[in-house]
Image (spheres, grey):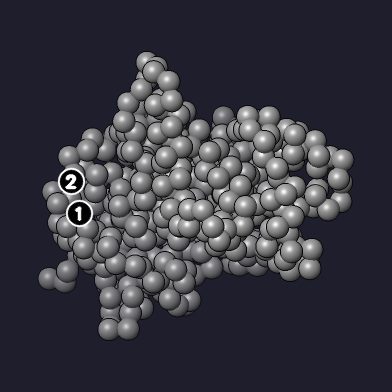
Amino acid sequence: MREPYIVGIDLGATQLRFIAAKSKTGEIRKSGPEDKGKYFFPSPFKKMGEGFLIDNLLKKIPLHERTSVYLYEKLNIFLKKSALKKSQVKAIGISVPGRILPGNKFMGANTPFTYATKDRYGNYGIDVMGTIKREFKEIKIALDNDCNCAGLAQGLYYKSLGIDPHTTFYITISTGIGGGGPRRDLDEVGHIPVDGGFPGLIPRCGCGAYGCLEAYASGEGILNQALNILRLYREDKRMFKQFETYESMRLNKPLHLSEKILVSHLEREYSRGRQLSTKLIFRKAALDKEKTGFDPFARYLVETAAVRTAKIIVAISYIHGLERIGIGGSVALENPRYVELISAEVNRIFWKTPHILQREVKVELSPLGYYVNDYGALSLVLDHKDIDQWVATMKKLANTKNETFMTFGHKEI
Ligand SMILES: [Zn+2]
């Protein structure tokens, strides 16, 4: 008999990724020596001009069925490319960037309403697994929020270390911010509103609201904060002065922000009309150099984002009884010192003064590293009796850098 496999499908905002792993051990399927075992296609929700890629796909299919048909078509191509027979697929796990609704539908902050249907409670949801379910009748198919999936995989790892997975949580810091865990009771952590923003500079989030954590402290959020402050610095001196005073009061120490900007490399680049990036901000913040060699404005931006993130982490740990938080996502994985900064701030808040909820909360880089997302969708449907084998495989991989993650998949088919 042919070896059975589990297929993981990760539907993201820009990519639709497929991975297959041996159902007994979790080893990732490779069909040849050059194959990294993972395939990606453009996401149907990839932004294209004013609309989405899906606007131009499968035009003969009714709008609300297009997503699920697209996923099924790409799944078939993936199976063919991986030399897998349909009969070898034992289970399929699907992760999506949004909230799961009744009837296996979902809705995310960046998903188009046009492709959704409305249920009797007025919720709009997009069907992603209808076609796959019809075509793969006998097998287990499950759907969950992408961060809950990653949190589930990470929780298996923590469990093997003797930590109750229900006290663990996963947070991703990349273009956006999300979170999830084995309890699946909290996913939109990036859209918690944070206070303490200067009234003239409260950023609007992709979800439409103002002042979400994501709008301040995600990769894109940090960059936008930098651009907005620099714009104010150059174009509205009076308001910038107010902002500077406001920030000094908020931090309860003289901040001298204009002096920081005056010597800032970021400001020089900005004034020359060059493009700034999150990468540049982190490089200039030089978190691994303690005293010298850093751009003080870049350091201020990164530290402010870390403090805002830490406060939300403390808040959710109080409410959900969390004790171990693993952080992943490109910003965290490429800047481990940033995670240490957040961790130090979380500890500072917990131990500053004695209080009733005081306890050890550990914040660290996700122990699954670059593989946490790969195993997310897969771990939704894996057999409980195989967990030890899977964890052993994940541990082996976790210490290696997953290049396919870095380049967002190795081939588009
Ligand atoms: Zn938001």
Q: Secondary structure at mark 1?
A: helix
- Circle 1 packing at 10 Å, graded few (<14), some (14-19), many (20+), is many
**350 or 148, which is in the foreground?**
350
Q: Which residue is mark 2?
A: 160
Q: Is residue 173 above or below residue 308?
A: below
The residue drawn where x is 49% and y is 45% is: 178
| Mark 2 / mark 1, whichever is N-terminal | 2
The residue drawn where x is 33% and y is 75% is: 36
Q: Which residue is mark 1?
A: 391
From the viewer's perspective, tell me whether residue 405 is left or right of residue 381.
right
Q: Is residue 47 visible?
A: yes
Q: Is residue 332 visible?
A: no
Q: Secondary structure at mark 2?
A: helix
From the viewer's perspective, tell me whether residue 6 is left or right of residue 127.
left
Outermost top residue: 356
The residue drawn where x is 76% and y is 38% is: 243
- Circle 2 packing at 10 Å, graded few (<14), some (14-19), many (20+), is some
Q: Position of residue 11 (x, y in %)?
A: 47, 57
Q: Is mark 2 within 8 Å of ligand 1?
A: no
Q: Position of residue 158 (x, y in %)?
A: 24, 44
Q: Position of residue 124 (x, y in %)?
A: 59, 40
From the viewer's perspective, tell me whether residue 228 is left or right of residue 122.
right
- Amino acid tagged 2: Ser
Q: Position of residue 20 (x, y in %)?
A: 30, 66
- Amino acid tagged 1: Val
**171 or 26, which is in the foreground?**
171
Task: Say whether marks 2 and 1 touch (CB < 8 Å).
Answer: yes
Label at residue 83 = none
